Image (cartoon, rainbow, N blue to C red):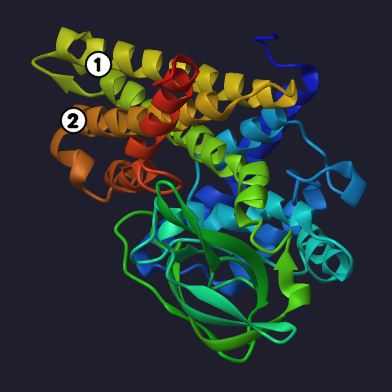
Amino acid sequence: MQFGLTEEQDMIVKTVRSFVEKEIYPHEQLVERTGEVPKEIAQEIKQKTLDLGFYACNFPESVGAAGLSHVDFALVERELGRGSMALNHFFGRPQNILMACKGDQIDRYLMPAVRGERMDALAMTEPDAGSDVRGMKCTATRDGADWIVNGSKHFISGAEHADFFIVFVATGVDETPRGPKKRITTFLVDRGTKGFDVRKGYNSVSHKGYKNCILDFDDCRLPQAQVLGEVDGGFAVMNEWLYATRITVATMSVGRARRCFDYALNYAAERKQFGQQIGKFQGVSFQIADMITEIDAADWLTLAAAWRLDQGLPANREIASAKLYASEMLARVTDKTLQIFGGMGLMDDFPIERFWRDARVERIWDGTSEIQRHIISRDLLRPLGG
C-alpha cells in the first residue's frame, strides 16, 4: 500500500482545495445568513467545475467522465468537505447508482447527469423507515404494464435542484422464517410527473442552505421503463453502488475537521491569557495533540477503505469503520475547537459554531453510528457463528 500521494493525487488535492477556497468560502456567510444559494452562484460553481473537468469525476471514463479511482475520489471529497455543503453540491457528483441504467435510460438519465445537464436526487428515507429500509410504506403496485406509486419520502437532500429522482419503493412482501420482508424496487422519476410532488422539508440547524425536501406520491403512474435495475432488485443495486455515500461522509468529515483544526491551532498560538499564549497551557496543548492524532487516524482509515475498493477487496466493514470513526471524530474536534475559542466560539464572528452544528448530522445520515457498529460487529461475528 502506498502511503504517500502520487504526483497526480497531490495535484488533485491542490486543485480542489484551491477551488473550495476561491469559489466556495467567499459565499459561505451569505448562505449561512439567508439559508439559500442564489441561482447565479450555483450555476457559476457548476460551470467552473465543468470547465475544470471535475464534474461527475466519480464516474468512469467509459461514460466520458474523469474515471478517478476510489482513493482519488476520496481525496476530492475530503477537500470539498472543507466548504459549505450547500455550495459544493454544485461541484456535481451524481449518484453512482446511475451506472445501472440500461437502454434508453442511458441517454435520458445517465449521460445528461454526467454532462451536468440534469441533476439527480436519491430518495430512500421515510418517516417510519430510516435505517430500517425494509420498513418502507411507500409502495408500487402493478396496473397492467405500469406501476402505481403511493406514499412519501422525507429528508431528501438536493431535491429542490433535482430534475429527476432515484426512488426506492416497496413492491411486494416475502414470507420468511424470520417474518415478512418487503421487496424493494428502484424507480427513476422525473420532476413534474403527474401524481408526484416535491415540497419543502424541515428547517435544519445543520448545513444551512443544503435543504431537505418531502416527496409525495399520489397514484403516480410509472411505466416499466422507469425501473432501474430489476423489479424487486432494489437491494442489489443498493449494495452494488451505494457504499460510496458512507465513504463520502467519512472523507468530508475529515476535510471539515482539518479546516476546524486550523482555526484551533492558530487561535491557540495567537490568543494570550495570563501573559502567555494559551497553546502553552497543557490543558490546551494536549487537546491540540489529541485532535490532530484523531484526524490523521480517521484520514488513513478512510483512505484505506477506499484503497480496498480499488483492489477489489471486501470493504463493507472497513467503510463502516471509517464512517463511524470519522463522523464521531468530527464531533469531538469541533467541540474541542469551540472550547479552545471559549465564548467567542459561539459567536458568528467565526465559523466555529457552524462547524459544531453541522457536525451533528454526520452521525445520523447515511446510516447512524449505531447502524455502522451493527455492520462492523456482524461482519466479525458471522464467520464465528455469532
In the image, residue 278 above or below residue 339: above
Give the mark nearer the N terminus: 2 vs 1: 1
User: How far across and how far down the image is residue 323, in percent?
Assistant: 46, 33
Indicate the quadrant where residue 3 lies.
top right
Foreground of the two, 191 or 15:
191
In the image, residue 199 above or below residue 119: below
The quarter of the rendered structure image containing the C terminus is top left
Q: Residue at x 77, y 54 (%)?
A: 100
What numbered label is drawn on residue 339?
2
What numbered label is drawn on residue 287?
1
C-alpha distance separating marks 2 and 1:
10 Å
Within-10-Å neighbours for mark 2: few <14, some 14–19, many 20+: some
In the image, residue 321 above or below residue 49: above
Is residue 239 in view?
yes
What is the three-letter code of the residue carrying label 2?
Gln
User: How far across and how far down the image is residue 182, in percent?
Assistant: 49, 60
Q: Is residue 336 left or right of residue 355?
A: left
User: How far across and how far down the image is residue 335, in percent?
Assistant: 24, 33
